C-alpha cells in the first residue's frame, strides 16, 4: 500500500491503538494513545511497533519512557514536540513517511533512542537542544540543507557516530561542533543546483597551466578532469 496523502483529514479526537494506528471505541486498557485536535497528547503503555495515525499534525510529550521498538511517523506531521519520544531506549527504528511536511523537531525529542540509521526529512528547518542526544547505535548521519536552526548537543554523546554529511550554508562549523559533532568527520560531497565554479585567468610555466577557482570553498569537495594530460586541485583551489 502506498504512502497516504499529506493532505489526509485530521483524525477524530479519541484513543487509538498503539500498534495499529486505528481508532478505539474505548479508552480503557493499555496500548492506547490519545489524539486531541490533531495532536498526540498522551499514551498508555505503548510498546513495540507504534504507528501514528495518518492525519496527525503534531506529536506532543506523549511517549516519554515508553518501551517502543519502532515508530512510523506520517507525512502529515509538521512538528515533534519537546520530549515526545524522550528516554525511549528501545526505539531502534524511526521512519518518516515520504513527502514529509515535518519542519520542527523539539528539544529532547528522541533523547536516548537507539536507531541504527536515521533519515531526517528534507523539510526540517529546526532541530532543538539535545533532540537526538545519546544515540548509541548510529554510525553516520545526514543533516538536510534545509536546517537553519540546530540546538546545542542535538547530536551529543552519539558514541558510535563517526561521520556526518552537511552541504548547507546556514549552519557554521561552530554550530555543528556545539551540536555534538566535534571530532566527527564531516563529509561535504555536495551537488548544488545552479552552483558553478568561477575561474581566474590561467597562468603558464614550463608547459604547465595553473588556474585559481575564484569562489573556492573548502567546505566542498571538488572533482577535476582534463581531456589532455593530468590535472589536480590543491587545498586552496
Image (tube, rainbow, N blue to C red):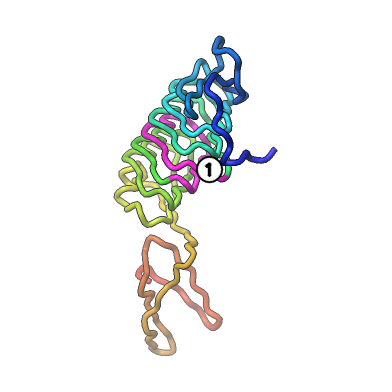
Q: Position of residue 54 (x, y in %)?
A: 58, 32
Farthest-out residue, top: 28
Is residue 162 or residue 67 the one in the foreground?
Answer: 67
Farthest-out residue, bottom: 206
Residue under the image location 60 percent in, 21 percent down: 23
Q: Position of residue 216 (x, y in %)?
A: 37, 69
Left or right of 12 on screen, residue 218: left
- Picture quadrant where residue 162 is located: top left
Secondary structure character of the magenta stretch overall: loop
Is residue 160 visible in the rendered structure shown here? yes
Local packing at callout 1 (Cα closer than 10 Å; few below 14, some 14-19, many 20+) is many
Left or right of 18 on screen, residue 126: left
Q: Label 1's element?
A: loop
Tell me the quadrant of the picture where the C terminus can be found.
Answer: bottom left
Residue under the image location 57 percent in, 22 percent down: 18
Q: Position of residue 64 (x, y in %)?
A: 43, 23
Task: Specify whether residue 102 is painted magenta.
Answer: yes
- Picture quadrant where residue 52 is located: top right
Q: Position of residue 183 (x, y in %)?
A: 36, 47
Residue under the image location 48 percent in, 77 percent down: 231
Tell me the quadrant of the picture where the N terminus can be found.
Answer: top right
Residue at which label 1 appears? 100
Relative to 54, residue 178 above or below:
below
Residue under the image location 43 percent in, 85 percent down: 208
Task: Specify whether residue 184 is painted magenta.
Answer: no
Relative to 210, residue 196 above or below:
above
Is residue 93 visible in the rendered structure shown here? no
- Looking at the rendering, the stretch of residues picked out in magenta corresponds to 99-124
Amino acid at each position: 500500500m502506498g504512502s497516504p496523502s499529506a493532505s489526509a483529514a485530521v483524525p477524530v479526537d479519541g484513543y487509538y491503538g498503539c500498534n495499529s494506528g486505528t481508532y478505539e471505541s474505548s479508552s480503557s486498557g493499555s496500548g492506547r494513545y490519545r489524539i486531541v485536535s490533531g495532536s498526540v497528547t498522551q499514551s498508555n503503555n505503548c510498546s513495540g511497533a507504534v504507528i501514528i495515525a495518518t492525519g496527525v499534525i503534531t506529536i506532543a510529550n506523549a511517549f516519554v519512557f515508553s518501551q517502543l521498538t519502532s515508530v512510523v511517523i506520517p507525512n502529515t506531521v509538521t512538528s515533534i514536540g519537546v520530549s515526545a519520544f524522550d528516554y525511549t531506549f528501545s526505539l531502534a527504528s524511526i521512519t518518516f513517511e515520504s513527502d514529509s511536511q515535518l519542519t520542527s523537531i523539539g528539544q529532547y525529542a528522541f533523547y536516548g533512542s537507539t536507531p541504527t540509521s536515521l533519515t531526517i526529512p528534507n523539510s526540517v528547518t529546526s532541530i532543538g537542544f539535545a533532540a537526538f542526544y545519546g544515540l548509541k547505535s548510529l554510525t553516520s548521519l545526514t543533516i538536510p540543507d534545509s536546517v537553519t536552526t540546530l540546538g546545542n548537543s542535538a547530536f551529543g554523546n552519539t558514541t558510535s557516530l563517526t561521520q556526518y554529511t552537511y552541504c548547507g550554508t546556514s549552519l557554521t562549523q561552530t554550530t555543528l561542533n556545539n551540536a555534538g559533532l566535534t571530532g566527527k568527520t564531516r563529509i561535504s560531497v555536495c551537488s548544488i543546483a545552479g552552483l558553478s565554479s568561477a575561474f581566474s585567468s590561467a597562468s603558464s610555466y614550463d608547459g604547465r597551466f595553473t588556474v585559481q577557482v575564484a569562489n573556492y570553498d573548502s567546505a566542498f569537495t571538488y572533482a577535476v578532469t582534463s581531456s589532455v594530460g593530468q590535472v589536480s586541485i590543491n587545498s586552496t583551489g
